Image: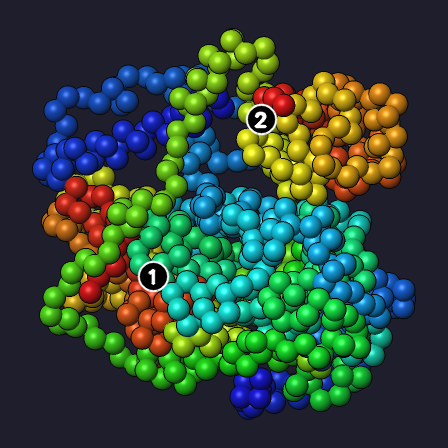
Amino acid sequence: MSDNNKGNGASRRSFLRGAAAAGAGAFAAGAARAETPDPLITQVQPWAQGFGDGVDETPYGLPIRFEGDVIRRNVEWLTADTISSINFTPIHALDGTITPQGCAFERHHSGAIELKKEDYRLMINGLVDTPLVFSYADLERFPRENHVYFCECAANTGMEWAGAQLNGAQFTHGMIHNMEYTGVPLRTLLEEAGLDTAGDLKDKWVFVEGADASSNGRSIPMEKALDDVLVAFKANGEALRKEHGYPVRLVVPGWEGNMWIKWIRRIEVTDTPVESREETSKYTDTMEDGTSRKWTWAMDAKSVVTSPSPQAPITHGTGPLVITGLAWSGRGAITRVDVSRDGGKTWETARLAKPGEKMALTRFYLDTDWDGSEMMLQSRAMDDTGYVQPTKTQLREVRGLNSIYHNNCIQTWLVRSNGEAENVEVS
Amino acid sequence: MSKYLKSAALLAILALGSGPVAAEKLGLGRAALPEEIAAWDMDVHPDGTGLPVGAGDAIDGEEIFAEQCAVCHGDFAEGIGNWPKLAGGQDTLDRDDPLKTVGSYWPYLSTTFDYVRRSMPYGNAGTLTDDEVYAIVAYILYSNDLIDDDFVLSNETFLDVGMPNADGFFIDNRAETEYSQWSGEPCMENCKDEVKVTMRAMVLDVTPQEETSAPAQDAVAEEAVEAAFDVELAAEGEKVFRKCKACHQVGDGAKNRVGPTLNGIVGHAAGAVDGFKYSKPLQEVADDGLVWTDDELKAFLAKPKEYLKGTKMSFAGLRKEEDQAAVIEYLKSFGQ
């Protein structure tokens, strides 16, 4: 393992340098015709001669060391320390739609805690017929469901309000992951405790809070609580990771990640919202006139080209090029993604890998032929409400520059003729 | 809320929701005891619901704040470095980079009480008495010029305090202001006359570099020969120390926080960092001459609460011996 980072780091560096120095001309040879026989084919290679690892070499496998740079990264200057902080999913290097747990972004308010299943308790109290306490084992005895949902931090792309700032899709759009969750509908648990006491449910809320020291708490309207919120204990088939709330977290489909309470310990039915710190002082969107929008829970439709992008330059020269990216909407399913190569003058409709699913990531591809000329790459998502992802200019016209949260603007990558890409803003 | 909940869909959902419920109960879980609910149900609502009986003023609060909060938030709640500023910023919300503090932005005082009691002090949450929370909240209000120093904040006077930005919020109106204009068939051709790059991320140059750790490792190996300690192990220790960082500072400019600074701690007498208020048990063993040798530190770090009953250090411990050794090695790299 010791040469793990060495190999990756060196290759990436020299590779970018090489790309910059060589320019497009060097690539143009394109259509391959071998001059001399390839020793990787004509000579017997060590891996084709001896043994590889036996079974059990890695009882729980990690990605091969050559992929060691596909990892979460943080931006140190964003936060005061790593305990109350965030890092970013390497979306530039992933494909498909499911985010592996090991590289799915983390956001903690007082660190990722270790909480054993045996020590786990979930309390339901407040305006319920019988306040209850569930153990982890109790939760596994309720009928459960499987759903794929994205979880996006409301601050995703938040550093880009005032201008192009961070140079990489991981940093501009990586506060997102998409997993298949297994869990019990919150509705089932609320009904187990009984909601007759609550009376008219229309104006009721649930307050949910975590077991960690920050005890992050959020108020959720009863309508949402009874609709599709899950109390989840598995992601992508296996137990949640510690950093994502093991053993149990809340899944609030389509709504901002801060509401997806990790290590959830308590659910209280109330008749007013708590107006906690995370729903007043944070996660509220300040407009140009200084007033602020609150209860902006749903994440609007958004998309980004993940490759090519600043961390994933074009290295193969002209010819066939796969442009790909992700699209999602917290208010429904993605129905269409358009891609522009000229900064929004003309658009062509990309191919969706699969029909969009509600509140889950959708992968899009534009299979094209690149002539080596400069591109201003953009993508524009549409969802089944008819909503069209706005430009940054459109967003600023309504909200000004100080909103921080819920920036779902169209992103532009300037791809140069040498294949390198940069985060830019265009007129 | 009302707009949000008026939809027909909602009524349908709720109608389904309350009907056949009782029959489907599985009888799982057990009844929560009143003591259990009291222990966890601590949220405080804007109308004061949930406030405990208690009181405190800014004069008491100043002292508690200096001890418990100032290391991050500053003596005057002005915030240190990247840590949150709690005071100031009034009349900045409509400017570039508004300063959002309790005084300038937070609409409800209940939020401050709820949050301080729930989550603070950072790294030692849930240790304040209710009176201390009232006093700290009073001091934050005082720092924002919202109360006089003789005002006693209590469950009875709580709603007398006016918050400047109480009317500064409105409920999500994206449906009216945004969804209606950003929908329909979008432009596909000749959508703009010309496109110019107006801003570039590379100009700012604030993106983290993908550093290769290889050269660093080589350098580390060389240094290791010179220095008398294991630098690779110390590098591991730096990672382990992340668990300690919330409470302990090391290096130049280190200050006492929830825990004392740890510069020069290995091999040093216990309980001797200037200006830090140690727990009684620690002070006692320090008076008996305890020195933080490698072995003593290992034993302490393995199970702090067993090693020293009554220690203020609320850390669960480092189970792995290699983690204990690594973090000690790391601490050796910081002299007095």
Q: Position of residue A220 (x, y in %)?
A: 63, 73
For image coordinates 64% across by 57% down, the residue present is: A262
How crowded pointer 1 is (Cα within 10 Å; few <14, some 14-19, many 20+) is rated as some
**Dot 1: element:** loop
Residue B285 as seen in the image, left or right of residue A53 = right
Residue drawn at (22%, 43%), measured in percent from left and top? A420
Q: Is residue A182 left or right of residue A343?
A: right
Name which residue type carries label 1.
Ala
Residue at 17% from the left image edge and 41% from the top image edge = A418
The image shows residue A204, relative to residue A276, as above or below, that is below
Q: CA distance from mark 2 to mark 1?
A: 38 Å
> Is residue A350 among what the camera can see?
no
Q: Position of residue A8 (x, y in %)?
A: 38, 30
Q: Please give the label number shown on residue A162.
A: 1
Image x and y of residue B82, in percent? 51, 49
Q: Which mark is residue B288?
A: none
Q: Tell me the amino acid under the disc marked 2.
A: Glu
- Left/right placement of residue A148 relative to residue A163 reads right
Q: Which residue is mark 2?
A: B236
Give the chain of mark 2.
Answer: B
In the image, B200 versus A185, the foreground residue is: B200
Residue B39 image offset from top left, x and y in percent: 84, 62
Quadrant of the rendering where the C terminus of chain B is positioned: top right
Pick the quarter of the image with the N terminus of chain B: bottom right
Q: Are marks 2 and 1 in contact (CB under 8 Å)?
A: no
Residue B288 is drawn in which quadrant?
Answer: top right
SS under mark 2: helix
